[in-house]
Image: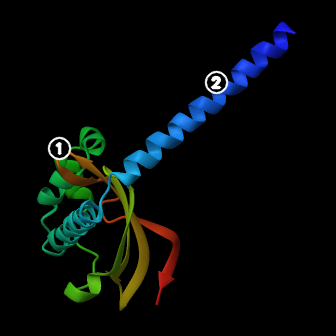
């Protein structure tokens, strides 16, 4: 009988913990008003477009400042600049299109876009860029500053 009581208590504790976690997740999400969501989306898009613009002007030393703390600790500015010299992106309006932002939390978003890359002709890839809010600014992984190519598929 004692074993059954302990198991029942364990189940109730687990259910309470799950309920509490659910409330935490939904309360954080519900704190995001429409205005806050729009501000997060606009700031993330602005940051991404700034990174793309800096790439087109081959200002990789400035892109480095948009790296998240973890990737800046793991990669020096000199290494980043040397690995990214030369911009493969298409010209102005072809470089980035169809941007969508999915808010994961107030400090993390997934930004999806169609990214134009220069080859013999412009080829478009669907990319996803995870961005984190650090020190009040949106940051990217410097290993993938323009985003990770989704399934390596070319988009027409």
Residue at 79 percent of width and 14 percent of height: 5
x, y (%) of residue 128?
A: 41, 66
x, y (%) of residue 96?
A: 29, 80
Asked if disc 2 and disc 1 are in contact, CB closer than 8 Å, the reply is no
Question: Which image quarter: residue 64?
Answer: bottom left
Residue at 17 percent of width and 73 percent of height: 53
Residue at 72 percent of width and 26 percent of height: 11
| Nearer the observer, 1 or 97 | 1
x, y (%) of residue 142?
A: 29, 53
Q: Real-space Cα distance between discs 2 and 1? A: 37 Å
| Nearer the observer, 37 or 124 | 37
The image quadrant where one finds the N terminus is top right
Q: Disc 2 marks which residue?
A: 13
Image position of 150 (left or right of 117): right
Q: Disc 1 marks which residue?
A: 135
- Looking at the rendered structure, the secondary structure element under dot 1 is loop
- Looking at the rendered structure, the secondary structure element under dot 2 is helix
Image position of 92 (left or right of 112): left
x, y (%) of residue 104?
A: 41, 55
* Vertical position of residue 83 compared to residue 19: above or below: below
Answer with mark 2 or mark 1, whichever residue precedes in sequence.
Answer: 2
Residue at 84 percent of width and 16 percent of height: 4
* Vertical position of residue 44 compared to residue 11: above or below: below
Image position of 102 (left or right of 50): right
């Amino acid at each position: 009988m004692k074993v059954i009581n302990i198991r029942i208590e364990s189940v109730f504790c687990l259910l309470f913990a799950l309920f509490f976690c659910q409330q935490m997740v939904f309360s954080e999400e519900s704190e995001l008003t429409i205005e806050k969501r729009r501000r997060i989306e606009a700031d993330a898009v602005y940051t991404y477009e700034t990174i793309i613009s800096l790439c087109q002007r081959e200002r990789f030393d400035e892109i480095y400042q948009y790296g998240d703390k973890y990737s800046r600790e793991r990669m020096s500015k000199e290494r980043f600049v040397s690995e990214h010299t030369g911009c493969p992106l298409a010209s102005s309006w072809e470089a980035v299109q169809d941007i969508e932002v999915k808010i994961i939390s107030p400090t993390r978003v997934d930004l999806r876009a169609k990214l134009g890359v220069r080859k013999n002709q412009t080829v478009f890839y669907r990319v996803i860029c995870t961005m984190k809010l650090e020190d009040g600014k949106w940051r990217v992984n410097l290993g993938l500053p323009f985003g990770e190519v989704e399934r390596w598929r070319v988009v027409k």
